Image (cartoon, rainbow, N blue to C red):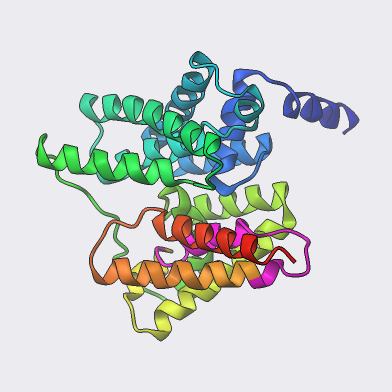
């Protein structure tokens, strides 16, 4: 046990590209933990080996971009140049069938996402996953408009009472485009390993956002797939700490993300993590107005 802990601490504190990639993937849920990143990789591979490869490839591409352009080593070692690229890589394989053009877009998009992340960092703008959102929206538009690609979608063909118990975990899974229950559980466990507080906040948010969607009679299929929960999960985790007001800020962020998600759903817009980004940026701004 002591040897395992020693090895873990040594790897966690190392600056190897392996550690950078794992931390970059763990930063999808705003965590900086190699075991968390490893569980996320396993969770994606469980559902799709192609998405798993895209996850690692995109994270590596984004991180190497930061290395080539000599961005902040401190931020690089934290994995801050990998997570938007990670989501982009998996996202493009979620929307489109795998082929050479898609993989070229994954690479180029990962590079651009890393560059955008650096711009936001230098401007001191809490952009969260906004680089991923921007680059993915543009990529989808170009692929459909100029390459005539058709998007594919995930469906749930049968409903059962068990789906009321499954959707909170699928809310975690959908953060990285996974409806697979096992993937969602692995992502949840990964967050708990890094931060019990973040896990609790995220799980509560996943449940409550799904219940709100059901209360407003929105699509049961989307609720059970976790599509009304994943933005809420991230919104809650973003403000999960031990301060006495953390639940208040997290709740406000979750409610805002649901309102934004609800609006985008009504207008049939591709949401990605934009509801989380916008809600969290609003709450960060409010917190700055009321620092006490």
Rendered view: 73 above or below 136: above
Magenta stretch contains residue 228? yes
Res 165 seen here: no
Res 144 seen here: yes
Rendered view: 124 above or below 163: above
Please report the residue visible at 42 percent of the width from the left and 67 percent of the height from the top: 228
Give the image location of residue 110, x and y in percent.
39, 29
Give the image location of residue 238, x and y in percent.
60, 56
Q: Residue lying farthest right?
A: 2
> Which corner quadrant of the image does residue 214 belong to?
bottom left
Magenta stretch contains residue 245? yes
Q: Residue lying farthest front?
A: 289
Rendered view: 138 above or below 18: below
Give the image location of residue 14, x and y in percent.
73, 22
- Which image quarter holds the N terminus? top right
Magenta residues, as a range? 227-248
Q: Residue lying farthest top?
A: 68
Rendered view: 220 above or below 130: below
Please report the residue visible at 38 percent of the width from the left and 38 percent of the height from the top: 88
């Amino acid at each position: 046990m002591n040897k395992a802990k020693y090895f873990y601490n040594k790897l966690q504190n190392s600056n190897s590209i392996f550690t950078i990639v794992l931390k970059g993937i763990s930063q999808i849920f705003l965590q900086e933990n190699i075991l968390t990143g490893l569980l996320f990789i396993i969770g994606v591979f469980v559902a799709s080996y192609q998405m798993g490869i895209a996850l690692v490839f995109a994270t590596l591409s984004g991180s190497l971009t930061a290395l080539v352009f000599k961005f902040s080593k401190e931020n690089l070692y934290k994995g801050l140049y990998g997570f938007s690229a990670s989501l982009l890589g998996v996202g493009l394989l979620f929307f489109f069938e795998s082929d050479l053009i898609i993989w070229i877009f994954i690479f180029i998009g990962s590079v651009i996402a890393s560059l955008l992340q650096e711009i936001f960092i230098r401007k001191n703008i809490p952009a969260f996953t906004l680089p991923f959102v921007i680059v993915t929206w543009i990529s989808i538009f170009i692929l459909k408009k100029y390459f005539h690609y058709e998007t594919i979608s995930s469906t749930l063909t049968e409903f059962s009472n068990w789906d009321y118990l499954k959707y909170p975990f699928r809310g975690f899974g959908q953060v990285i485009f996974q409806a697979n229950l096992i993937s969602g559980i692995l992502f949840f466990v990964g967050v708990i390993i890094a931060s019990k507080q973040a896990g609790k906040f995220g799980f509560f948010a996943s449940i409550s956002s799904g219940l709100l969607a059901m209360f407003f009679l929105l699509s049961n299929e989307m609720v059970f797939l976790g599509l009304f929960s994943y933005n809420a999960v991230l919104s809650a985790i973003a403000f999960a700490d031990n301060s006495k007001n953390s639940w208040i800020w997290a709740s406000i962020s979750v409610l805002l993300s649901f309102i934004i998600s609800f609006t985008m759903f009504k207008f049939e817009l591709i949401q990605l993590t934009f509801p989380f980004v916008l809600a969290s940026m609003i709450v960060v701004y409010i917190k700055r107005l009321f620092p006490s």
